[in-house]
Amino acid sequence: MIVTGHINFFSINECGLYKQGSDKPHDLKLVETLSLVAKWFHGKPLTDTLPWAPDQTKTGLSKCYCRDLYHDEESGEYLFVLWKSDTDAAGSLLGAPEDQPAGKGTVVEYTNNYQGNKVIWGRPCYYWFIPNQNIVASIKFDHSVCDSNLMQEWMLRVMTNKIDHPTKRKERTESGQVRFSYTDKISALLGRFSYRFSAKLIAIDTASSELAALASRVVGIIHRETIRLDKPKDERARWLKLFDHIEYLNPKPQTKTRQIEIRAEAKPTVVELKRIIEKFAKENRKRSEWDNVGFQTEDGAMVWADRYRLHEQINMNQESTKVFAAAELHERLSKNRARLLKGLTAAKKPGVSQVAKSVGQSTPLKKSA
């Protein structure tokens, strides 16, 4: 069976050791970071690749493991198969053996009466690191998920919590932050550093005629959000609570959430449009999801930010619920590298449009409820 993977590209904005207030890494840059993470991962069972204590995770942050990892020595690229433990997610859950290393063992599909070997329920997340372009790409199939924030957190925590740095000293501040300093006397004079890892979704370039044309038509910004009503403490803003007292707008009993839409008149520049797109376009948003950010145009249409991210596709042959091995997926990506990365170069050329294929089509503007 042929399945399609949807690829989104991220620029790696930060990777390495930074002095406070500096935007230039001093050490542990991308190539070294990836090499250290790969060495740390090698031979570990899945359960040991969670880089933070299970009871010390951030609120709302899923557990994240590494199922498989491949390094292509010729290109210097890496393919990570992270494993997001996401038991409450919609869709089919898969179980990866918790005591097997590096992609070993059979992945099983969830059933209510499963009684096999111990597994970690979740789904794979595929990430393709391309150091020579300072890029990481997410690849989303029907059986997988994308969560770039979780990937960034995983990379950061591995580097700060799990990896030994023989030439450096690690200290934890009262607030729980890890600080690095050098052990040799000369380098120690440089003081303390923090490790950072962050990536940003790539939108089409500001020189694109497509983005310039959009800027000339935009008259407002639209923000859709789902707010929870079932929290013990009502943390909604005061103006949102006013809707509870307006006839016909009071939520029905037992309602847990409410969908709101905010529109504001605005005339953003091309640069401001690109910043909004990079911040709010999502790599894995489904068309059925309410939460979104977009633009209202002068002709009464809504154009969603997702439409303007760089996006490509790759086809793979999949057997049943098979999770792709890191080496297998990288081989396919490598064979199509020229086509897949063409947009990264083209986006830098004036007047070239790289609009995502079949994503975020314009829809007629409807009046707010």
Image: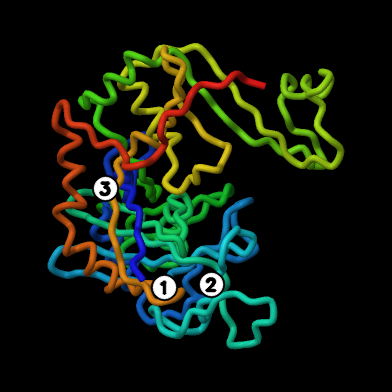
Image location of residue 290, percent across then percent down: 58, 37
Could you give the CA–CA distance between mark 1 and mark 2, rounded to whole angstroms? 9 Å
Circle on res. 94:
2
Question: CB atoms at circles 1 and 2 under 8 Å apart?
Answer: yes
Image location of residue 2, percent across then percent down: 33, 67
The amino acid type of the residue labelled 1 equals Val
Determine which residue is flagged by label 3: 26
- Give neighbour class at mark 2: few <14, some 14-19, many 20+ (Cα, 10 Å): many
Frontmost residue, 75 versus 206: 206
- Please, which colouring scheme is shown? rainbow
Determine which residue is flagged by label 1: 323
Image location of residue 313, percent across then percent down: 29, 53
- Give neighbour class at mark 1: few <14, some 14-19, many 20+ (Cα, 10 Å): many
Quadrant showing the N terminus? bottom left
Which residue is at 38% across, 62% downward? 126
Could you give the CA–CA distance between mark 1 and mark 3, rounded to whole angstroms? 37 Å
Q: Is residue 190 visible?
A: no
Label 3 sits on a secondary structure element that is loop
The amino acid type of the residue labelled 3 equals His
Image location of residue 94, percent across then percent down: 53, 72
Which residue is at 56% across, 74% downward? 120
Q: Earlier in the sequence, mark 3 or mark 2?
A: 3
